[in-house]
Structures are given as C-alpha cells and as structure tokens.
Amino acid sequence: MSFRKVVRQSKFRHVFGQPVKNDQCYEDIRVSRVTWDSTFCAVNPKFLAVIVEASGGGAFLVLPLSKTGRIDKAYPTVCGHTGPVLDIDWCPHNDEVIASGSEDCTVMVWQIPENGLASPLTEPVVVLEGHTKRVGIVTWHPTARNVLLSAGCDNVVLIWNVGTAEELYRLDSLHPDLIYNVSWSRNGSLFCSACKDKSVRIIDPRRGTLVAERERAHEGARPMRAIFLADGKVFTTGFSRMSERQLALWDPENLEEPMALQELDSSNGALLPFYDPDTSMVYVCGKGDSSIRYFEITDEPPYIHFLNTFTSKEPQRGMGSMPKRGLEVSKCEIARFYKLHERKCEPIVMTVPRKSDLFQDDLYPDTAGPEAALEAEEWPARRGPQLGPPRGLHIHCLRSHRRPHRQPHRSWGGWEAGGGDAGAPGTEGAGQGAGGAHWPPGGAAWPSGERGRLGP
C-alpha cells in the first residue's frame, strides 16, 4: 500500500526570523511620515539609508552598518532636495552611490564618502531633471553600469545615463495613470510595472514597446505591486474587489489567467514583495503590519507555497532588504531585513537551521556580483527581450575557501569569461569551461571577491 506524500519537501520549510538584540538596532531615527507607498529604506553591505523627517526640504540618513545604538539628532544627513524624498536606491555596482527621487520633481545621485558622512551632504554628483511632477520611483539597472530608471506622478518613465546626465529613453505614452512600482527583469532587458489603472505591463524600454499587458490583474482599487522573478514570470500583490489582499503569479506568455492566486487577509496596508532569486523565495511585508510572510515559488502547482510568518509587536513603517553579498554565510543567514519603526530601525535575520558549521552549498548558489556586465553606452545597442532565464549577470560566489585555477582573461567581441575555456561566442556554453564562472549556477565556483564576467 502506497501513502501519498503529505508534507512537501523543502529545505526552506523551517526558515525562521529573529530580531537582533537592542544594542544592534538603530535608535532615535525620525522616519518620514510622507504618504507614499515606498520602502523608505535601502541597504547594502556597507551602508543603511533611511528617509527621515526634515524641515525645509527632503533628507535621508546614511549610516555605516556598524553605527548601531542611538543616533544623535545632529547626525549629518543627505539634504539636497527642496521637497520630501519619496524613494531611494543603492547602486548595485558601487556601494557608495545612491539615487533619490523627490517631490521637487528631480532625481539626484549622491557619492557617499567611504567612511560615511562627517558633515551634511548637499551637493549631488548628478541632478537629473525631466519629470514635471514628483518622482516616486528610482531603480538602478541590474547589469548595466550607470543606467537608472525613474518614474514620476506625471505617468512618465525615464531611463538615464547617469554618467552623462542624459535621457536614454522617455516612455510617456504607455501608462495612462499613476505608476505604483517598476521592477527590472533579472538581466535588465525588460521591466514590469503596476499602474493605478489596475494593469500590469511588461515593457521593452529600448524598443519603447509593450511586450505584454494584463488588465485588471487585481480587481481592487488600492495599490498593487509587480516584480519580475528570475525565470521571467511576474509576481504581483494587490487587492480583490472585496478589499482582500492577494498574491498572484503570472506567465508573461499567457496573461489571460494567473498561474496561482492566493488571498491573504483583509488588512488595508499595501503589500511590499521582496524576492530572492537564489532561493526562489518571496517575502511579503504589509505597510502597517507587524509581520513578514514568506513563500517559496516552484515549478509545481500550486506554485506559491506558504512557508511561515515572522511576527512581532510593532507595526512596520517601511522595510529594507540586504543584498546576498552582505549576509553571514557562516550562520546560514539567507535574508536580512531592516524594519522601520516610528523611531528606530530593527534588523531581522532569516536563518535556515543547520547543525553543521561547514559552508552550505545548497543555500548559497552563485549570486549576482557587484561588477557591471555592460557600460551605459553599450546597453542601448543590445536589443532583444528575454523572458527566459537570464544571461548577462556578473556571478559572485559567497564561498571563500575554494580557489579554482585561473587562466588569462579571454574575450570574443563582448562575450567574456573570467578564466577557463569558455567555449564559442554566443553559445549556451559561453563562460562554462574548466574553472570558469557558470550560469546557471553550478560547477566550479569563484571564491569571494573573484567574479566571472558574462555578456548578455
């Protein structure tokens, strides 16, 4: 007699969240009260940035991660905007560069000193002016250096070359209403957006065309969000007609019906999704909630698998997520969130319980590294949307104790591999020779600090 498997097997089934001790929190931070559904927080392996209350303009704090405890009220801020700051985003290719969007209709890019701020920073490196209404969204391109996307309440999406401060693309006819959020695909060839007209759109910015559109992705009138997953699928959060919060998974090849649709609860806070492509996990944080729900996305029905909920007492005003490069692999830490309270920021560590102290290969596949695959000038010339698995990412290995043999750097007209016999240009095997960086993850891995380079 055969028994059907009752419990789904998953190595992330027992992931648990744990807040850090009080002395490791960031106390006495006056988090912004502006009415905008942004995360209000951005973090990288060097700095924590939080949008704060400021008189006479907009400002945000930038703190070295080590500066925990009470933050002096006189601590210097980044304060060059003349209106409240609405969104901030760290550059994925330079841990000392951050972009900010504001109600003053401008986008500013800032260079943070290596050791943090010693005095107020009022002069940005670049000011990007092109929007006619407040700028609520800024997000860096994942693979091309110095390419920044901004979206404003004028329903316009602008893509900038930050190095020259010029517009690369202006997309002003694709969104008839307010844009709630924008998310790049893993290799940066496409982006998806959620709009107030209840539509989710997939857009090729270099062609200026709509690749796919789903009208009324969620029936409710409250804000929704859409993010790209690593395999090209789209994950959305929103509200039903009865104002129940929902999650949905969509296949861009067929947007008629969602692959999966789940209802959560009837709270009214917007759901902010955070995606980890290495573990295929989505963490969902509701504004005003006191919990973080996390799910695993798989290729098998029902596709969205609920794992667990981290619950605390205080509601969250915003949330930041640490890139994989900043996690402690020795403690099996797979995610770290920075939860904003009214007057403090509290790190929350997500851990997979393991007995062994050895490096856990299955938890830490090769991840996106800090090196850009393309320069801003190269990106516009390379067209061709991809909805499948990404190519064109810098690969970064979190393992530090294995050192493969390295060979001299080779390149073939834009296809490059950091060592190994990388195969013919343009083939699926490019960059997958002996000792080279592999994509998809697997095979020989780079030690920490050494990256293979693959062109898109």
Image (cartoon, grey):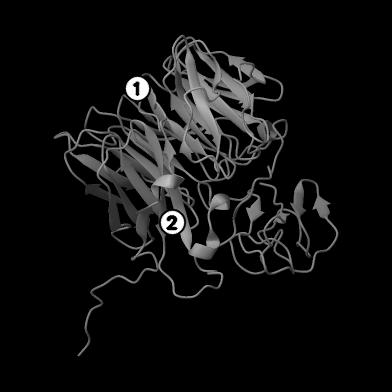
Residue 271 numbered mark, or none: none
Q: Residue at x 81, y 51 (%)?
A: 412
- Give left or right: position of 241 versus 54: left
- Give left or right: position of 149 versus 300: right
Tell me residue 370's x, y (percent): 65, 45
Tell me residue 102's x, y (percent): 48, 17
Helix, strand or loop under label 2: loop
Residue 33 numbered mark, or none: 1
Q: Quadrant of residue 120?
A: top right
Which quadrant: the N terminus? bottom left
Extreme-bottom residue of the structure: 1
Q: Is residue 358 visible to us here? A: yes
Q: Residue at x 23, y 74 (%)?
A: 6
Q: What amino acid does circle 1 point to? A: Arg
Q: Compute the Cα span from label 1 to label 2.
A: 33 Å
Q: Which residue is mark 2?
A: 280
